[in-house]
Image (cartoon, helix red, strand yellow):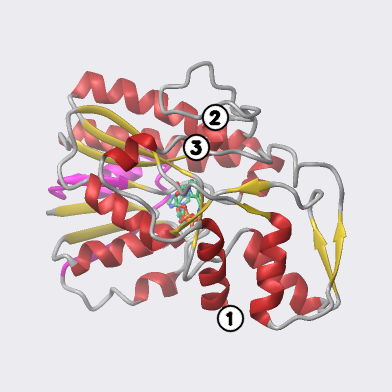
């Protein structure tokens, strides 16, 4: 099978590329290194089944032109802006990197008659549901960040292209994903802050924000399992863990694992970390559990394992 992985130089994408290559597939990666890195993909460069294109995917014509002669069986679309706070300061970041990259992928598929799509969506499309059970068929969603809006708009466009062009589409809505080679997010921020000041740690919000963290290798298992043969039409799954971890617990685990003692936590206050942040949520995971996948790490275990890798 020949797979195209957009955003393959990123955190999750590079794990997926490794797994696809290990299972004997041909893999094309497209990335522009805005957030991904050359080092992440250097490890694949000697593999004859691996090919890399450095392209801005949001530039639709350039992207489609570069790939027009590739016979692709499936697209794993992971390219997006993952720096939520950068996107929060400038809506054009998510319009370009999160929404327009999706449009370009859909155009490539339409023009080249590619039928299979995996899309990495997010819990952020649900917005702040205030304790409602977040099932895949929940309607009337109101995303509260530009990132969530751009992913929700992407899901809408994906739905229309899927129906107009008979695609087989698998959409996963991820919660926070963590694990080896992570370079952004709360764990990483805490580590950097503690290196600067080992006695005091600034925590955004009041520390009670509590979210499920899924371990990246568990997620890759789910992606591989559910994209072996994608049923026709749109297939949407929440992905995650049944447990969740508060920001203060993350701080405790980071300090414990990295050997920082007697650290004073300084909370910035309020119940959110930043505008657009959803402080508490929990997915309904019945659908993916019934399909035969369950995460092997709890949320706290995923946090601890990630800190050990970062160490
Ligand atoms: N990590 C998480 O917690 C999380 C949670 C929910 C959803 N997701 C989604 O999963 C996917 C992968 O996330 P990640 O954490 O690996 O992020 P990442 O930033 O590490 O990877 C995204 C990759 O996309 C590339 N990219 C961005 N815009 C591009 C463009 N215009 N042209 C070409 N390449 C471009 C970046 O350089 C980067 O390598 C994203 O779609 C993200 O929205 C991630």
Residue found 33% across the figure and 57% down from its top: 220
**SS at badge 2:** helix
- Which one is in front, 104 or 144? 144
Q: Which mark is residue 283?
A: 3
Determine if the magenta segment contains residue 67: yes
Badge 2 density bin: few <14, some 14–19, many ≥20, Cα 10 Å: many
Segment colored magenta: 49-76
Q: Label 3: few (<14), some or many (≥20) within 10 Å?
A: many
In the picture, measured across the screen, residue 93 lies left or right of residue 219, that is right
Check the image and report above or below for 159 versus 225: above
Residue on which disc 1 sits = 311
Q: Residues within 10 Å of mark 1 (few under 14, many from 20)?
A: few
Q: Nearer the viewer, residue 294 or 85?
A: 294
Which of labels 2 and 3 is toward the front? Answer: 3
Point out residue 73 in the picture as x, y percentages from the top left corner: 15, 46
Under circle 1, the secondary element is loop
Quarter holding residue 91:
top right
Which residue in the structure is indicated by mark 2? Answer: 126
Residue 288: % across, % down = 33, 40
Labels in figure, total: 3
Task: First in sequence, mark 2 or 3: give its number.
Answer: 2
Residue 277 pos. (x, y %): 68, 40
Marks 2 and 1, how far apart at CA: 33 Å
In this view, the residue farthest toward the top is: 140
N-term-proximal mark, 1 vs 3: 3
Residue at the farthest bottom position:
259
Kindly report which numbered mark, 1 or 3, lies closer to the viewer in this rendering: 3
Q: Which mark is residue 285?
A: none
Q: Residue at x 26, y 64 (%)?
A: 19
- Whichever of callouts 2 and 1 sits on the residue coming sooner in the sequence is 2
Image height of 31 relative to 78, above or below: below
Q: Is residue 74 magenta?
A: yes
């Amino acid at each position: 099978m020949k797979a195209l992985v957009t955003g393959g130089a990123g955190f999750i994408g590079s794990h997926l590329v490794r797994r696809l290559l290990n299972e004997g597939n041909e893999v094309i990666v497209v990335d522009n290194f805005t957030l991904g890195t050359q080092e992440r993909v250097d490890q694949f460069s000697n593999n004859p089944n691996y090919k890399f294109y450095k392209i801005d995917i949001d530039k639709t014509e350039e992207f489609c032109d570069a790939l027009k002669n590739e016979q692709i069986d499936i697209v794993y679309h992971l390219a997006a802006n993952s720096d939520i706070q950068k996107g929060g300061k400038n809506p054009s970041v998510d319009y370009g990197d999160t929404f327009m990259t999706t449009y370009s992928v859909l155009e490539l598929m339409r023009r080249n008659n590619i039928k299979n799509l995996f899309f990495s969506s997010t819990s952020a499309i649900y917005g702040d549901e205030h304790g409602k059970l977040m099932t895949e068929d929940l309607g009337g969603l109101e995303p509260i960040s530009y990132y969530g809006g751009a992913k929700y708009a992407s899901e809408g466009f994906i739905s229309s292209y899927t129906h107009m062009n008979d695609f087989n589409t698998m959409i996963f809505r991820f919660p926070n994903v963590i694990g080896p080679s992570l370079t952004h997010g709360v764990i990483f921020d805490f580590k950097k802050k503690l290196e600067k000041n080992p006695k005091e740690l600034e925590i955004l919000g009041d520390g009670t924000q509590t979210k499920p963290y899924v371990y990246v290798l568990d997620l890759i298992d789910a992606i591989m399992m559910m994209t072996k043969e994608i049923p026709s039409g749109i297939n949407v799954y929440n992905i995650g863990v049944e447990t969740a971890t508060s920001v203060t617990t993350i701080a405790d685990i980071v300090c414990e694992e990295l050997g920082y003692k007697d650290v004073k936590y300084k909370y910035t206050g309020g119940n959110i970390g930043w505008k657009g942040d959803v402080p508490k949520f929990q997915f309904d995971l019945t659908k993916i559990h019934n399909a035969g996948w369950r995460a092997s790490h709890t949320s706290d275990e995923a946090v601890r394992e990630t800190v050990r890798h970062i160490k």
